[in-house]
Amino acid sequence: MNELDYGLLEALTLRPRAPWSQVSTALGVSAATAARRWEALRSQGLAWMSAFPGPRYAPGSRIVEIHIACTPHRRKDVAQALAEHPDMLSISAMVGDWDLVINTQTNAGIAGIEALLDDPIWSHPGIRGRSVAQAVRLFSQGNDWRIGALAPAQTAELLGARTARNEVVSDSAREHMTRLLHEDPRMSASSLAEALRTSVATVGRRLETLLHEGAISVRTEVAASVSGWSSGGYLYLDVPPRLLDAVGQYISHLPSTRLSMGVLHSRWNLSTVFWLNRIEQLLDIEETITSQFPEVRVVHRATRLREIKRLGWLLDDDERVKSRVPIRFSA
């Protein structure tokens, strides 16, 4: 990958659905060149897009984090079985107290969590234990992570002046639009309008509303192995409740942060994930956090062996995308 590729990925991270004309203006290349480079990255499995129900997709939307301990020599078997399950959105292999970590979302409230935890998949003979945390605050996630390849003027060109919409969107329209974008995150407004049997203007207002509210998330993804951040680290923190928002927000603004999430768990209440150039940087991040907030206690540290699945996309041993397991919207 070259500097143009990194700039292109940064541009599409900021605005996944930006027209190629806008992307090309920000990057100083032709629209055809931008589109051609994206297709090359996508075809090599180095970059892809995901569209999925956001954290505010429905009143019953709940994010759940599940840690799995496997019996010896069964981690790969367990990972493969879990990866093929449509409700297990993202899975990584870890070095730490657990062998796997799963991040997923149910849109059916407490009943959805109960159904998830009662799923027959957990009877797999290779699973010897699990630990479950439910999110209560989402300070930042992968959508907010930046490569850092663009100058401020280029970023301003892409973001522009955007007005938050307040369109009333029915449940059925929201689900239909999310399903369409799940199949093609860059589906044109005209194609969406045709599928939804409405006008292009109405589609534009609805989509801006749903994106602004966090009901739909559209994300540009890059293979960690070629992003420059080939290592991953996890810190699980016990934070005094009065400081949870301050610490969670502080961590969310660190450049390496991929996830900062307040959770309900017996041992910690803040889960964090970082993409790193070197795994040793996790110690530097820990020192930064605990120096800023001495009352914070690190309960557990872990490192990522590799990503297995990210938001429904299955990854190969080099963490390149290879296929997709469609998610279940009603789960």
Image (cartoon, rainbow, N blue to C red):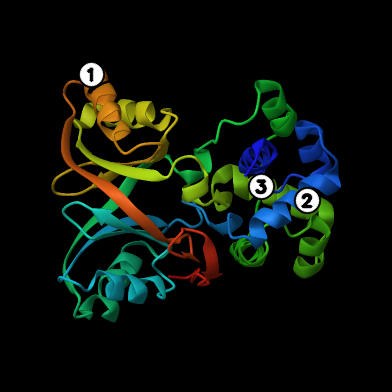
Binning the other alpha carbons within 10 Å of mark 2 as few (below 14), some (14 to 19) or many (20 upward) gives some
Picture mark count: 3
* Amino acid type, callout 1: Ser
Quadrant assignment, res 172: bottom right
Circle 2 residue: 35
Q: Are marks 2 and 1 in contact (CB under 8 Å)?
A: no
Binning the other alpha carbons within 10 Å of mark 3 as few (below 14), some (14 to 19) or many (20 upward) gives many
* Amino acid type, callout 3: Pro
Binning the other alpha carbons within 10 Å of mark 1 as few (below 14), some (14 to 19) or many (20 upward) gives few
Residue 328 location, x and y as percent? Answer: 48, 71
| Residue shown at the point (19%, 57%) measured from the top left | 98
Quadrant assignment, res 234: top left
Direction from residue 5 to residue 91 in the image, left or right:
left
Front of the two marks 3 and 2:
2
Direction from residue 249 to residue 199 in the image, left or right:
right
Q: Which numbered tag is attached to residue 261? A: none
Residue 43 location, x and y as percent? Answer: 66, 62
- Depth check: give the residue in front, 188 or 298: 298
Q: Disc 1 on helix, strand or loop?
A: helix
Residue 27 location, x and y as percent? Answer: 76, 34
Q: Earlier in the sequence, mark 2 or mark 1?
A: 2
Estimate the spatial distance between the alpha carbons at disc 1 and disc 3, rounded to whole Å. 36 Å
Q: Disc 3 on helix, strand or loop?
A: loop
Residue 169 location, x and y as percent? Answer: 65, 55
Estimate the spatial distance between the alpha carbons at disc 3 and disc 2, rounded to whole Å. 12 Å
Q: Which numbered tag is attached to residue 291? A: 1
Circle 3 residue: 16
Image quadrant in which the C terminus is located? bottom left
Direction from residue 65 to residue 201 in the image, left or right:
right
- Depth check: give the residue in front, 265 or 66: 66
Front of the two marks 2 and 1:
2
